[in-house]
Image (spheres, grey):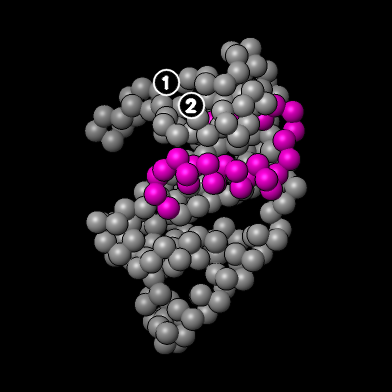
């Protein structure tokens, strides 16, 4: 339900320490399950994005990277850390090592600067990659620009024709996943009084939710 540990303790009638201890155990079990089961899945269409949050206080901003395999709706990988080249490479490399490419996969992201270089280095011309760049004014999208970064316009057209879900280059599915994540985690909700005190605590809740 996305409520805090204190609220869970109040609703269930157990102590806060008991709830926190069982949540930690469940998170560790979920992490092991995700690591063991997420293997050999088909990679046909990927979308990637990042969610902003902070740990402890706003002086310690951090990001949750999330990647979805669109055709299966599989939350393929996630990573908590700074919005850096190293973490961008790590989360995409995790998907590549665990999954199997089917043909030339279609990959879509926002305009974050490191995606293009990382995808070119890890996959190169074996995919079709594009960016969806949205311009906002007063919290409303007023312009959407689509750029093909790897591949040709013809290859993009063929990839979209073969896609069961996308008619145009988009990041709609990962944005929907972001909303689901924010609704399911008290730590990641907007305007929430609940925030993780350490990175391991946040990652544990993410793995539990992902499971």
Q: Which of marks 1 and 2 is in front?
A: 2
Please name the residue that numbered disc 1 is placed on: 145
61 displayed left or right of 76: left
Above or below — where is 76 with respect to 148? below
Name which residue lies at 41% across and 31% down.
113
Q: As rendered, which of 11 and 44 lies closer to the eye?
A: 44
Extent of the magenta region: 81-108
Q: In which quarter of the image is the C terminus?
A: bottom right
Would residue 134 be visible to someone looking at this image? Answer: yes
The location of residue 101, given as percent across then percent down, is 72, 35
Kind of element beneath mark 1: strand
The location of residue 43, given as percent across then percent down, is 69, 38
User: Magenta includes 95?
Assistant: yes
Q: How crowded is mark 1: few (under 14 residues within 10 Å), some or many (20 or more)?
A: few
Would residue 163 be visible to someone looking at this image? Answer: no
The location of residue 167, given as percent across then percent down, is 59, 24
Please name the residue that numbered disc 2 is placed on: 131
Name which residue lies at 69% across and 48% down.
98
Kind of element beneath mark 2: strand
Above or below — where is 18 with respect to 28? below
Q: Distance between the residues labelled 1 and 2?
A: 8 Å
The location of residue 55, given as percent across then percent down, is 34, 61
Task: Assess whether mark 2 and mark 1 are in contact (beta carbons under 8 angstroms).
Answer: no
Q: As rendered, which of 22 and 122 lies closer to the eye?
A: 122
186 displayed left or right of 92: left
Name which residue lies at 57% across and 42% down.
92
Name which residue lies at 48% across and 61% down.
203
Q: Which mark is residue 133?
A: none
């Amino acid at each position: 339900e996305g409520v805090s540990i204190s609220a869970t303790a109040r609703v269930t009638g157990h102590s806060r320490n008991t709830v926190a201890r069982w949540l930690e155990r469940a998170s560790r079990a979920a992490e092991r399950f995700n690591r063991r089961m997420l293997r050999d899945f088909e990679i046909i269409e990927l979308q990637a994005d990042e969610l902003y949050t902070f740990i402890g206080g706003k002086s310690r901003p951090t990001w949750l990277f999330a990647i979805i395999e669109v055709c299966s709706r599989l939350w393929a990988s996630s990573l908590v850390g700074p919005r850096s080249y190293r973490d961008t490479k790590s989360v995409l490399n995790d998907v590549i090592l665990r999954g199997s490419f089917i043909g030339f996969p279609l990959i879509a992201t926002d305009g974050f600067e490191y995606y293009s270089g990382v995808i070119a280095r890890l996959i190169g011309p074996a995919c079709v990659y594009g960016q969806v760049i949205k311009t906002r004014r007063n919290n409303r999208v007023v312009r959407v620009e689509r750029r093909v970064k790897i591949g040709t316009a013809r290859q993009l057209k063929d990839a979209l024709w073969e896609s069961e879900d996308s008619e145009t280059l988009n990041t709609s599915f990962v944005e929907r996943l972001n909303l689901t994540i924010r609704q399911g985690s008290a730590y990641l909700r907007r305007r929430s009084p609940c925030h993780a005190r350490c990175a391991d605590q946040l990652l544990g809740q993410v793995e539990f939710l992902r499971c």
